[in-house]
Image (spheres, rainbow, N blue to C red):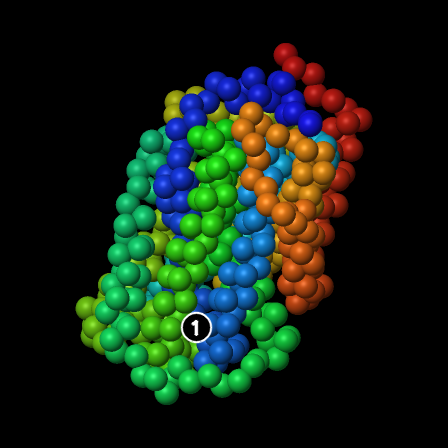
Amino acid sequence: MAELPASSQRVDEQLLRAIGVLGLTANIVNTTVGASIFKLPADMAKQLGAAAPLAFVVCAIAMAFFVTSFALAGSRVSLTGGLYAYAELAFGRYVGFITGLFFYTTAVLSVAAVVNFFAGTVFALIPSLAGTWGHFAVLLVVYAGLAAINVRGVRAGTGAVGVVTIAKLVPLLILVFVGVFFLHPPYLSWPGWPGASSLGHSVLLLLFAFFGIEVALIPSGEVKNPARTVPRAIYLALAITTVLYLLIQLVAQGSLGPRLGQETNAPLAAAAATFLGHAGQLLLLGGATISGFGFIASDILSSPRILFALGRDGILPRALTHVHPRYRTPDVAIIVYATLAFLFSLSSTFEALAVMANVAALLLYLVCCAAAFVLMRRDIQTDAPPFDFPGAKIVPLISIVLILWILAQATAHEFKIAGAVFLVGTILYLIRLAFPVRNG
């Protein structure tokens, strides 16, 4: 039986293991259920029509294999870092570093996509702002404002995130619990099986709404009895998320029918308007806007720290480690991160950015599913018995096949960002080896 590195164990032993099943489940659900579910029902209806719920089922099945792989790995590696820690322990520092870069790339592309969605909800609330300059102005205000808030201090950044969970879940729950009484059965009639290509492209986009587990698992060093807690929490969270998403799609589809695919900016608000009137429309528009803003605020609070860490370790320029002399925040990292995300937001639509983010995330998942197989083969364990069952080793292999099938739906253009990250990351890693940074 192999064991975790002693140095890593000593560092993580300083952390308090206080996160239980319900706490980790809530964290995963909160991270996963984001702004995209306010947008994606229209995209699914546009691509698959009344067969759109099938894409949710396929995503849930694929995610069940993926999260099982994460559970198998997470019950064996209790180090802080989540998927990054699994990859580094299984394959070494180079693969761990590239995995970390893909984590960062996914974050940048995801926040850029959500900011575009957020702008769309703002335009739905204030139509006079719609247009090229209005779009530019909304993006600039969001990024500049949140960057300034986070430069001024982590407490201010945390405060901007605090209200989001209730604000995004309450409108969705009202939509579901009220909307089920106003469905039009003809709008839900099964139209027949969609083509494999249409279904594959839909799944590639829809996975944007299911991703988030990898972020919620980062504090694995603070989870109580991870061999028990991680599997239970991720399965419970996946079940809750899938049921909620299916109900949302069915209510939106059963309310709007063929119109759903045309409501590209605020489909759930349009659905709510059919049975709750103008008040329902405003409720869902407000929920979508707040949810989008909350995701952006949370991301700009946390993700720039990746740049700071890479600068600290000498992989990226040391300038990224600059700390504001008054506010004691990584101001350069925050500004650089917000600027890059702003440029991505200007250059592409929500759908294009979401697919590119998904490609990066799926490559991340691919490495981590392979890591799960290696960790099991090497029998790396914590103090507690790991999560296991007959035939467990086949699950990561099935997961890898599913990921490759989904990635096959992407175009060469959608792989360009991922390819650039891999190339640049490899060059930076080789430079780091050739010119090691001396401490002090």
Q: Which residue lies under the disc numbered 1?
A: 42
Where is residue 31 drawn, in percent x and y? 42, 47
Q: Residue at x 46, y 44 (%)?
A: 232
Q: Residue furthest front?
A: 390
53 on left or right of 418:
left
Where is residue 233 drawn, in percent x and y? 44, 44
**Label 1: few (<14), some (14–19) or many (≥20) C-alpha neighbours in 10 Å:** many
Q: Residue at x 40, y 70 (%)?
A: 249
Quarter of the image where the N terminus is located = top right
Relative depth, front residue between 400 and 127:
400
Residue 385: quarter of image:
top right
Q: Residue at x 46, y 38 (%)?
A: 229
Q: Work out whether 381 lies above or below 55.
A: above
259 on left or right of 182:
right
Where is residue 223 drawn, in percent x and y? 45, 32
**Residue 227 appearing in the image:** yes
Amino acid, disc 1: Ala
Q: Work out whether 21 lies above or below 68.
A: above
Relative depth, front residue between 33 and 281:
33
Q: Residue furthest right?
A: 434
**Residue 143 appearing in the image:** no
Quarter of the image where the C terminus is located = top right
Q: What kind of element bears circle 1?
A: helix
Q: Work out whether 27 lies above or below 394.
A: above
Q: Residue furthest top?
A: 440
Residue 8: quarter of image:
top right
Relative depth, front residue between 348 and 69:
69
Q: Residue at x 63, y 47 (%)?
A: 390
Q: Work out whether 196 lies above or below 408.
A: below
79 on left or right of 266:
right
